[in-house]
Image (spheres, helix red, strand yellow):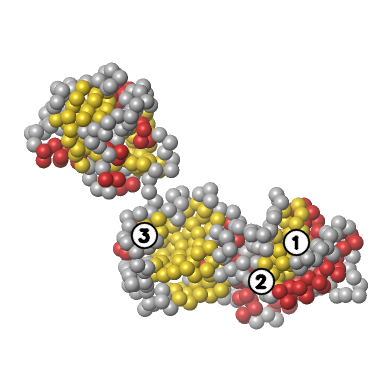
Amino acid sequence: MGNSGVAHAQEATWVQLAARPNLTQMEAQASEFEQRLGAVRGYALPSGWFALSLGPQDRTVSERMLQDLSRAGTIPADAFISDGGTYRSQVWPPNGAAAVQPQTNFAAVATPNTTQQPLGVLADETTEQAGISEKALSNEDRRDLQRALRWFNVYDGSIDGLFGPGTRQSMGDWQRQNGYPTTGILTSQQRSVLLDRHTSERAELGLERLVDEQAGISVDLPTGLVSFDRYDAPFVHYTSRDGSGVEVMLISQPGDRAMLAGLYDVLQTLEIIPITGYRKLEDNRFVLMGSNATRQSYAYAETGGGEVKGFILLWPADDLAQRDRVLTQMRASFTPLRGAVLSPQDRPDRANSRDQLAGLDIRRPLRSGAGFFIDRDGYVLTSAALTTGCARLTGPDDIAFTQVADDPALGLSLLRPSAPLVPLSVAQFTPTLPFTGAEVAVAGFPYGGRLDFASLTYGQFEEAVDLGGDPSRSRLSVKTDPEDMGGPVLTDTGAVVGMLLKAGTASGDSRVLPDDVRLSLNTAAVLPFLRTAGRQITEATGAGDGSPEALYDIARDMTVQVACWR
């Protein structure tokens, strides 16, 4: 998460002493701390509060400092080590004032000032005394403790104020994580530390209850990290504040289970949702999680009463512990308010685009092209120029392909589907080339791959070698698009005489070719490659009647679009 105005050394940490809601209180507290500790710095937080800290220094130094000063009672009991991830500009010492030099004699600092009371330290109790003081807590006090335990990801039970085995276990887990004896009963001091840290962290994040009557949603949002941007149905956009890298989108639209399932599919096509991650669609809700090197995403939606409501949380790849706390709070607080949803009118005026959904970019492949079925097992032959350098390959209905064989020299790639595919038609190969001037057709996906089915582009067979004299390639005269690369070259009866290669230069030649010059890899070069890969091929029988309609049917049923993704 971004930190403007604060220079962080590698592994730099701070001992955070306190957080105050305004500059006046921060300055008063800073002066008091400096009298007893020496080195104090103040930083603005995204929530508008201000943190007072000792540092920066290496983590080992911070750990020793925290331990020594806590034992001596010279710092608040809820002080903790911070990585500075939420620190923005430094506001203390004031501009023009010399920074107080850091105290290096910890033993001296750790000696309590006998004329002053320790800051915020409560006398600890025995387990028996802790149990007695716990009984005096109100039900709301008990709920607050459960909320704080949930915040620190040690409790996932109900917020009911009942301290059963689950709550006791979480108390013990929190004690163990924070260096206290593991008794399962918090002392008065431990309860104070737990609640103060919970309050401090919530304040840093600016977690506040949002009630959006237009979208019909109530939820806790980290307002210190995001700010309202716009309505763009079905989303309410909250963008990153002060470079935090965090974004939130509320989801609100009319709909039933079918609409929920459609939204589940659509969200997975968005650039903001990383490809890799857990995802599950149930009858009335879904969860979509994604992660990559820079981002973590979490999307949740549910349906009820003819409405679909949910949210998306986007978080930088670092500081996941803080993300988990915010996400837990959002899930626990999320409440659909029935009777209000966003409508299509809740959307800025703009031209429709195939590349966006409600202002969000739709994920597009690095490139796409054509391939064609070579057997009934659904194996697809395509161009190696299409498949080189791809993180993943997909085909019809986003079925993943795995490359099982390739020959870069020939320009061939053989793909196996990850799920069963039942081709309507497979290639029927013939090594016999057409005569010069004969009509041929190339099946592919022109117009940027916008069409769901293959198109045919007609041209002429010009020569049984390429311009460099290579007999494994033929020269065609046909104007194709880049997305036709890898498609079959067909005779009028539907026999495959070759595969279209990437448009560009001739074999071994750096000269650019005219627009209508295309090269085809001949079937005679393709067949040994397929046989070496262990595939059985079908020889041409002249199944087509030579009509354009019959040829199109053959091409449509065997040609598939292949997409290469980053």
Q: Is residue 167 visible?
A: no
- Percent x, y of residue 531: 29, 23
Residue at x 44% of width, y 50% of height: 275
The quadrant the N terminus occupies is: bottom right
The quadrant the C terminus occupies is: top left
* Real-space CA distance between mark 1 and mark 3, rounded to the nearest whole angstrom: 45 Å
Depicted 225 relative to depicted 270: above or below: below
Depicted 213 relative to depicted 539: above or below: below
- Percent x, y of residue 71: 83, 64
Towards the viewer: 293 or 515: 515
At mark 3, the secondary structure is: strand
- Percent x, y of residue 230: 44, 69
At mark 2, the secondary structure is: loop
- Percent x, y of residue 539: 18, 26
Tag 3 residue:
357
> Which is more N-terminal, label 3 or label 1?
1
Towards the viewer: 279 or 254: 254
Kind of residue at disc 3: Leu
> Which is more N-terminal, label 2 or label 3?
2
Tag 2 residue:
49
Please tell me how crowded label 3 is: few (under 14), some (14-19), or many (20+) other residues with Cα within 10 Å: some
Tag 1 residue:
15
The reply to whether the C-beta atoms of the residues labelled 2 and 1 are less than 8 Å apart is no
Classify residue 177 by image quadrant. bottom right
Kind of residue at disc 2: Trp
* Front tag of 1 and 3: 3
Across the whole image, how many numbered discs are drawn on residues?
3
